[in-house]
Image (cartoon, rainbow, N blue to C red):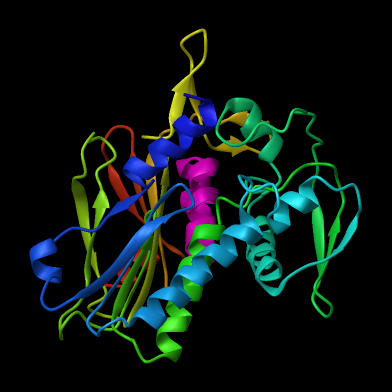
Amino acid sequence: MTRNLFSKLIALISGIALVIVAYNHNNQTLYIIDGNAYGTTWSVTSTSYIGDHHKNNIISIINDIDYVASNYKADSEISLINQDNKTEYKISVDLFNILQVAKTVENNSDGFYNIMMARKSGELGFSPNFGSTDIQKFVSSYRLNDDSFILYKDSSNWFDLSSVAKGYAVQKIHEYLIINKLTNHLIDIGGEIIINGTNNNDAWKVGIQDPSSLINKSIKILSNKNSSFLAIATSGEYRNFKFDSFGKKISHSINPNTLQSINNEIHSVTVLHDNSAAYADAYATLFNVMGFEKAFDKASNLDIAVMFILDDGKMIFSKKWYDLQL
């Protein structure tokens, strides 16, 4: 089994972050569609019937984002850019939106979030290996022209959109469902989740995976009882890691400041966002890479709801988390 296949298998088996729990609560006259994508599983649950045309359109959204953002598809939009030597590109609306989210988070990250670590990730065996692992250190590696959907690439580093693409796909599906008046729904792609509206006149309930458990077991139950919309994303190294030939643990997340696999006291970090699954996805990755103290301060400054589970089992919450009264 290749390293890439092994990495994808881990994602397929475990997702990365969240497990839908409280099944008995959520199973009253629900309609579910599901499948496989992005090396993991996806599902859409609704209190209204999801017709075949809606299912086909949702699958099209998932596939379209895959052909925009996947490094595993040689002909995806981002792969073609990665393999090209130009510095200026006219890009799709979806890629522009994904990169815009990533750039906003990067600008708030103190250098701990950058989506151009693909070569290094490949070297470590967590993404396709592109042959060269020559990484240029940088402050900013790409720029966007908001008026003309132009991408300017300032280095030879390769994009890796895995920290934001699933969340973006979840957001697009949510927007599609809202437009089509399927307002009461739960969307899950590999643990990136949106809950919206109600579950048969009650709140949706979602469980956060216990990072210390080898089986699907929740450690915290969340609901949207005090808000119609809630995006949820979790990041952690508790299932997606390996050991090198010396027995050293290597995690899939990379610190852009050091170009090294991270090693900190965070076991998992869960981010809640009140309007965007894409931002929840990206900020969860950022906070996981930063380490607890820096991440807690940053979340407080940005007024973001975060739950940290540390290696010693402690659960620590940002002020915004308490404000949501989950």
Which residue does the image show at 75% across and 28% down from the upper left?
133
Q: How many marks?
A: 0
Along the line of sight, which residue is nearer the eye, 128 or 119?
A: 128
Q: Main secondary structure of the magenta part?
A: helix
Q: Can I make out residue 202 in this image?
A: yes
Along the line of sight, which residue is nearer the eye, 102 or 295?
A: 102
Along the line of sight, which residue is nearer the eye, 191 or 2?
A: 2
> Image quadrant for the C terminus?
bottom left
Does residue 323 appear left or right of residue 102 in this picture? left
Q: Please identify the quarter of the rendering in which residue 122 is found.
A: top right
Residue 144 drawn above or below residue 87: below
Which residue does the image show at 30% across and 69% down from the upper left?
33
The picture places residue 83, in percent across and down from the top left corner, at 80, 45
Which residue does the image show at 41% across and 33% down from the upper left?
265
Q: Which residues are magenta?
A: 275-303
Magenta-span inclusion, residue 172: no
Residue 91 drawn above or below residue 311: below
Magenta-span inclusion, residue 297: yes
Q: Of all residues shown, which one is farthest toward the left?
A: 24
The picture places residue 307, in percent across and down from the top left corner, at 35, 54
Residue 313 drawn above or below residue 23: above
The picture places residue 200, in percent across and down from the top left corner, at 15, 83
Which residue does the image show at 21% across and 54% down from the upper left?
220
The picture places residue 4, in percent across and down from the top left corner, at 53, 32
Does residue 294 appear left or right of residue 174 in this picture? right
Q: Of all residues shown, which one is farthest toward the top?
A: 246
Q: Can I make out residue 237 in this image?
A: no
